[in-house]
Amino acid sequence: MQELRSSEILDQQIKADCEKRAATILSNAEVQSKKILDEVDGMIDDARKELEKASRDRIEFFKKNLESSVLLEKQRILVDYIYNSVMDAMNAYLENMGQEKRLSLVVSMLDSSKELLKDKSVEAVVFGFELADAEKVLKSMVNVKSSSKGNIILLEDECVRGLKFREGIILKSDDGKITLRLTLDEKIKEILADNTQQLAVALFGGRLPE
């Protein structure tokens, strides 16, 4: 009987000890779980903040690129608009001049170079103008050995965008050392290089469009 009672007491002690240990384990597990959850929450919060920052940076990057692209496109459109307006005015002016005056304009380009041809004879290739008219003007300035009509395709490499008139004269010395290109394209290039700003301001009434 005494042995049975002692066995029951021992069982109770073991049970109590097990319950105590289980409670400790559960308590520790709860603490660890809370710690892990807090760390996870912190990691999630950090990840969210990093993601939000990355998204803001990406949006800012695309916004700046878009603004730069819009500005460049606006400037390109403005430059094209001014250029096309200047060329429209230039074409209208050349058309009103008539072919005779355009021929005089082209031949006037020879003034600065005719000394080079002083003792030489030249071959003239005429584009767009009447051959007889070109010969008449040229012979008063240089010794023209021969002249012929040229295909305007030969002027394509030097053509000015937007210019409607493909007219001019190419002179070649008989010794092959000198070639002069007296064309409207070359004249317009010269005018544009020296006076684009002034032409644009004059065209838009003293004020460039914005």
Image (spheres, helix red, strand yellow):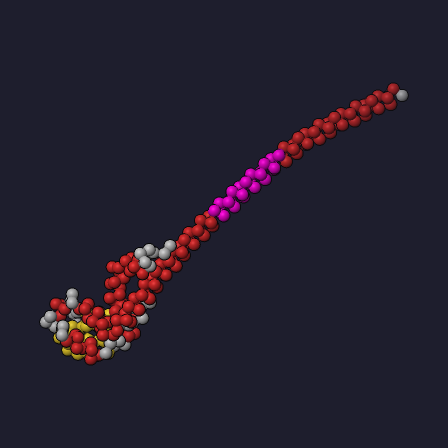
The magenta stretch spans residue 120 = no
Q: Residue at x 33, y 59 (%)?
A: 204
* Residue 13 appears in view: yes
Is residue 145 placed above or below 68 in the rendered structure? Answer: below
The reply, left or right, for residue 10 in relation to residue 120 is right
Residue 77 found in image quarter: bottom left
What quarter of the picture does the C terminus occupy?
Answer: bottom left
Q: Position of residue 74 (x, y in %)?
A: 40, 56
Instruction: Say which of 152 and 139 sits in front.
Output: 139
Q: Position of residue 21 (x, y in %)?
A: 73, 27
The reply, left or right, for residue 10 in relation to residue 168 is right
The reply, left or right, for residue 151 in relation to residue 1 is left
Q: Residue at x 34, y 63 (%)?
A: 85
Q: Position of residue 37 (x, y in %)?
A: 63, 36
The reply, left or right, for residue 34 in relation to residue 71 is right
Q: Main secondary structure of the magenta part?
A: helix
Instruction: Say which of 161 and 27 sits in front.
Output: 161
Q: Position of residue 167 (x, y in %)?
A: 26, 73
Is residue 99 placed above or below 200 in the rendered structure? Answer: below
What quarter of the picture does the N terminus occupy?
Answer: top right
Q: How many marks?
A: 0
In this picture, which residue range is highlighted in magenta? 38-60
Q: Residue at x 56, y 41 (%)?
A: 48
Q: Residue at x 31, y 65 (%)?
A: 89
The furthest residue to the right: 1
* Residue 174 appears in view: no
Is residue 88 placed above or below 201 in the rendered structure? Answer: below
Instruction: Say which of 150 and 85 sits in front.
Output: 85
Instruction: Say which of 113 and 61 sits in front.
Output: 113
The furthest residue to the left: 119
